[in-house]
Every structure is written in C-alpha cells, then in structure tokens.
Amino acid sequence: MPKSLTKNKNEKPFKLTLKDKAVKSAKKSARVPGVPAAITLDFAREWTQPRISKKRFEHVCGVAAVGDLLAKKAGVSRLLVGLACYLHDCCKETKDKELIEKARAFGLKLTAIEELNGHLLHGPVAAQTIKAELKITNVEVLASISEHTLGNAPMSDISKVVFLADCLEESRPKDFTEPIWQALSVPVPGSNKKVNLDRAMLVACDLSLSHLLNVGKPIHPKTVDVRNHFLGIVRTVEKSTN
Ligand SMILES: [Fe+2]
Ligand SMILES: [Fe+2]
C-alpha cells in the first residue's frame, strides 16, 4: 500500500490482523435513512459470520478494513460502506443453481451469461436477501452490495469504495492491488479529493478484463460497459485540464 494511503504520519501502519479488521467506528448505528437502528457494524459482521467459511469471513473483514480507510479518504459514510462491506459476500457460498432460483424468486431479470454462471448473481441476491431479512432499504448500501462484482455505470462513490475495497483486500495478488493503489493516489485535476476513485475503477476493470481474457473465462457485457464508462470519465477529466 502506498505511504500516502496509510492513515497519517503519526498513526501506526495500517494493520490487517483479524482484531483490527473489526471496524469499530460505529458501535451504534447512527440514524440513517433505510438502516434500522439495530443494524450496527457489529451486528452486520456477526450476522454474516455463520453464513460463510472462516476464510471467506477473513476476506469480508479485510474488505471492511480497506473500505473504512477508503471511506475516510473519499469523505463518504463509514457506516454505509462498513455495512455493505460486511454484508457483500453473505451469499458467496450459495450454490449457482440456488442463486439462480433465488434471483428469479426476487424478480431479478437474468441475462444469458448469468443463467450459465450463477455465481455472478451473489451480489444482487445478497442485496435482495438483506432487504428482505434485515429490512435495510438504504439504496446506497443495497446498490453497493449488488454492484460489487460487476460494477455499474454510473456508480455512487460509496459503491466505488466497496467495489475497490473488495479488489484491494490483503489476500488479493499484489500485481492486481498495487496498480489500483497507485491509481487511487493519482491527484484528481481541479479537485481536492484524497483518492481518485474513477481512475482506480478504470484500472481495476482493465485488470479484471485482462485476467478474464488470460484464463479464458466468459466476460459479462456489463464489465465492458463499466470499463468504458470509467475510461470516458478519466479521459474527460484529462482533456479538461490539458
Ligand atoms: Fe463477492
Ligand atoms: Fe468479496
């Protein structure tokens, strides 16, 4: 992780022990529209834990830790990011067939590639499950969870933070994470933003596409649309400053 993205000079280096991964910033849920008061970060973490393996739970806690760091840098709600991070993979270990059945039952429209690759639905199905079971209706939390695998065009800053945190969790390979960290630290021309979320999204999409091509996996059309969306944003910003 580049030094510029550690907390600050006087704080301890960013650690990713399991203890530290438990984001403690919001023991009690602030009153936020669409988030029941009982739904705290602790609650979300504990609700997810029994639904996934120990290894996946460590990933989830790692995503929440990176998400909290990025939320502070991006100036977005740490509570909403934290909730989305803790809940994003709650359906990741659901079988493909069941994900397809659940998606249909929730009334989601499936594309041909999703019919053949049910795992692509674990985000949208998670968002619907959380809405139904936890009564979370906050659109930013639900969209962030739904969009965490394929992204969307456009995306809110909260959704970008959750998507990027999922990419940057510490178990991901360094040749994937380092270019994204570097893109995050590129100054946004004409802005005082501390992280360049759009450039990081573009780099993450490019790397994902390149990986899918290398391993011969199918590419969801949305992945291409999202990549082109962020390429357009980055190019427009560059042109406006040249
Ligand atoms: Fe996921
Ligand atoms: Fe994940």
Image: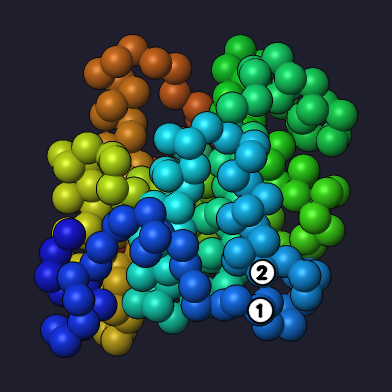
| Residue for badge 1 | 28
Quadrant position of the N terminus in the picture = bottom left
Task: Determine whether 80 is above or below 73 in the image.
Answer: above
The residue under label 1 is which amino acid type?
Lys
Relative to 186, is 194 on the left or the right?
Answer: right
Task: Determine whether 60 is above or below 149 in the image.
Answer: below
Labels 2 and 1 touching (C-beta < 8 A): yes
| Secondary structure beneath label 2 | loop
| Secondary structure beneath label 1 | loop
The residue under label 2 is which amino acid type?
Thr
Q: Where in the figure is residue 186, as x and y percent of width and height?
A: 19, 68
Separation (CA) of disc 2 from disc 1: 6 Å
Task: Determine whether 99 is above or below 192 in the image.
Answer: above
Residue 40 disc label = 2
Q: Where in the figure is residue 145, as x and y percent of width and height?
A: 60, 50
Relative to 109, is 162 on the left or the right?
Answer: left
Q: For residue 154, say whether it is visible.
A: no
Residue 180 disc label = none
Give the residue at x 39% y 60%.
19
